Image (spheres, helix red, strand yellow):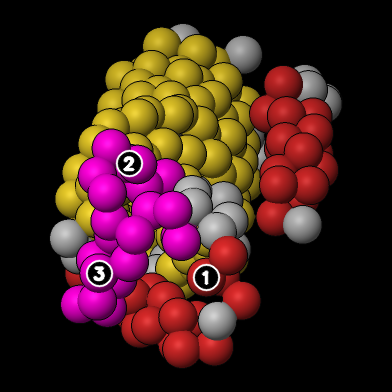
């Protein structure tokens, strides 16, 4: 369901970002590209009121790496995908701004346990790979996540080109881990209990990402 929503959100936000409706009387528009901890992306800035802008954007990136979590070696795919609706307040009248808004957060982590070993340690108990089969899972967060931050740059308040920076926090909630196996032991009630305990351990290990740091730099072109 979450992946299906990604396609819907992509279409709607891409329509907003890459369309060029008539300018509002209160301000201009600018189209920007950026890169940062939410991935690479594009955004449309709209001047709403003096010293007050709105931004709608898309971000995405994918990165694969290996790590060990709770005695198990995993191949991980970090999938960054998000859409944002942000409001900038240039309360000092210059480039410095306060930013707040909401992010449709589809960032998640796909986990696949490495099968090179003869066993897995799950909830401090050794299980053979033959019994467990393939161990895989996901870690995801709240779909709607508030954002609060500061920044520098006013894409619609100055010249035709603006370099900008964002620094803030995405409040994406505690991680939710979901593990599954393909082997015959998967139907065992005691094993399922241990697997749930393993999920809780993973959630505790990754709880620091409930407040996700956001940093981005980019350039915008006024039109």
Looking at the rendered structure, the number of numbered marks drawn on it comes to 3
Q: Which residue is mark 1?
A: 185
Residue range of the region highlighted in magenta in the rendering? 111-132
Looking at the rendered structure, the secondary structure element under dot 1 is helix
Horizontal and vertical percent position of residue 42: 54, 25
Instruction: Estimate the spatial distance between the alpha carbons at disc 1 and disc 2, rounded to whole Å.
Output: 18 Å
Residue that numbered label 2 is attached to: 114
Residue 106, percent across and down? 57, 51
Work out whether mark 3 precedes mark 1 in sequence or the reverse, and give the earlier one. 3
Residue under label 3 = 126
- The quarter of the image holding the C terminus is top right
Q: Which of disc 2 and disc 1 is earlier in sequence?
A: 2
Marks 3 and 2, the one that precedes in the sequence = 2
Relative height, residue 62 to residue 190 (above, below): above
At a point 28% along the width and 59% down the height, the residue shown is: 120
Question: Within 10 Å of the Cα at label 2, are there few (<14), some (14-19), or many (20+) other Cα atoms?
Answer: some
């Amino acid at each position: 369901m979450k992946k299906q929503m990604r396609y819907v959100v992509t279409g709607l936000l891409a329509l907003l970002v890459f369309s060029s409706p008539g300018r509002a009387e209160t301000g201009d528009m600018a189209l920007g590209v950026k890169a940062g901890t939410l991935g690479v992306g594009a955004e449309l800035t709209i001047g709403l009121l003096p010293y007050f802008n709105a931004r709608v954007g898309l971000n995405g990136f994918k990165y694969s790496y290996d790590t060990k979590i709770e005695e198990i070696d995993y191949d991980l795919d970090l999938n960054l995908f998000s859409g944002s609706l942000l409001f900038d307040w240039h309360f000092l009248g210059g480039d410095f701004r306060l930013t707040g808004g909401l992010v449709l957060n589809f960032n998640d982590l796909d986990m696949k346990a490495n099968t090179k070993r003869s066993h897995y340690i799950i909830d401090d108990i050794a299980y053979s790979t033959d019994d467990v089969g393939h161990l895989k899972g996901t870690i995801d967060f709240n779909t709607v996540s508030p954002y609060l931050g500061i920044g520098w740059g006013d894409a619609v308040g100055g010249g035709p080109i603006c370099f900008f920076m964002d620094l803030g926090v995405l409040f994406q909630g505690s991680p939710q881990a979901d593990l599954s196996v393909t082997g015959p032991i998967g139907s065992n009630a005691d094993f399922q209990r241990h697997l749930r305990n393993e999920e809780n351990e993973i959630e505790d290990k990754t709880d620091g990402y409930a407040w996700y740091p956001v940093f981005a730099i980019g350039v915008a072109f006024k039109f």
